[in-house]
Image (spheres, rainbow, N blue to C red):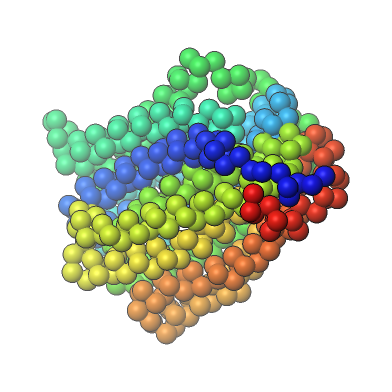
Amino acid sequence: MHYAKESFNWKDFLMKVAVIAIPVALQNLLTTTGSMVDTMMIASLGQTEVGAVGLCAQFSSLMFSGYWGFVGGGMLFISQYWGAKDEDGINRSYGLTLTCMMTVAILFCILGTVFPETVMKLYTDKEAIQRIGVEYLRIAAFSYPLMVFSMAMAVMLRCTERVRLPLYGSVASVAVNVALNWVLIFGHLGFPAMGVRGAALATVIAQCAGILVIMTLSKVARHPYLFAVKRHFQWDAQLIRAYFRKCAPILANEILIGVGNMMINVVLGRQPEEAIAALAVFRTLEGLVIGFFAGFSNASSILVGKEVGAGNLRTAYVRAWRLVYLCQLFIGLVGVTLIALHTPILSLMGMKGESFRIAFGLVCIFAVAAVIRMGNWVQNDTYRAAGDAVYGTVLEIVFMWVMLIPLVWFSGMVWHLPTLVVFAFCYSDEPIRYVLMQIHLFRGTWIKPVTEEGKRALEEFRRSGMGRQRKESNGN
């Protein structure tokens, strides 16, 4: 078959990307906007409070690393079974994904509520920050199972192309969170002023509101899979083996990367207090960029995984590399916008003096590095959705532990270099991995179907030498 001579329908492709990417990007934008409002409100309490809540967010990021491997596995199986129209496969994959994710969430909830002092001592040596962080974490940790349940439902809805329902849930969650922050942090409408504890309680209630909206709208829309509870847990040994075989590399990647990021945060948490506050504000802005990016990443996973599951391997291949470059272009534009508007944004979030200078430096470094970093991220998500959970995982783990962590640790803990230099080392491995990921992308060997339709089409795809013909098809 002469795939290279076939034209590519850009209009149809961009429409499909937009249908998935825009609602996901808006959902994440709403969540990040809520976090920015949180930060601005907490900033009025002081930079110590901002730093403490920011470090608590790093603990929740570690939880994210613990359950994200199951999200990747769930998207792989659900999207491919959706392409193959296998209802049992969709339901069982969701049930298994939900169970694994909730196990992680409950573990972190226990750590945050029972051992908050230990958690905070791990992330910083500043006693004032530790004390405030304990107050916040002891309440906020109850939101972890709620957050993960909401994420599991979002995975199911997105993979079955019902991307608007999680968006509506986020609208409700953010609205409730902002309103309750105003009431509980400062003590309006007759409530006592609770400070950071009020922000934590608002987070818990807001997560409940988001879940209620998603479930209500899904019920009204008669979603065929979300409420088929009995079918969610009818697993067999073959599915469990296949699921964990595909999830194992993703889990290893996310856990080792999560632990690696924790070590990096340990280094950054021992910088001056002005730098810790600047890093907390930066993480919120970073979430804004990643929120936009996540829309493209989800579109990539779903659009590629669906076609692989249906046996349309050529379509999956040509979509994949176009999605990578679209994502990088969009992230580049977002980074430029962030730099252009840095003064009003950082000022609103309580940055001034040395904290403002450091925060602006962090934004500039990230705006450049994010284009490459997000390119690596979307390629890895694409590989996982297509069935290859190993290649990107091995690269990321090896480079982080052999190159990245030693550079960050020695620069911060031994050589005591400036915060911005230490932070720049956090991205030192990205360009090398990008080159290796691009080579793998165009070879096409990352397409490894789990459905029978995909497996039947694989031999013909390999015979076509699709990856080697990319340069010819690029002009069509």
Q: Is residue 63 visible?
A: no
Residue 166 drawn at (x, y percent): 46, 31
In terms of image quadrants, where is residue 244?
top right
**Residue sitting at 25 percent across and 35 percent down?**
180
- The count of marks equals 0
Q: Left or right: where does residue 454 sit relative to residue 290? A: right
In terms of image quadrants, where is residue 188?
top left
- Viewer-side residue, 336 vs 281: 336
**Residue sitting at 21 percent across and 42 percent down?**
185
**Residue sitting at 60 percent across and 19 percent down?**
224
Residue 80 drawn at (x, y percent): 69, 36
Q: Is residue 114 above or below residue 18?
A: below
Q: Is residue 374 above or below residue 309?
A: below
Residue 127 drawn at (x, y percent): 30, 65
Q: Is residue 119 above or below residue 294?
A: below
Q: Is residue 164 above or below residue 364?
A: above
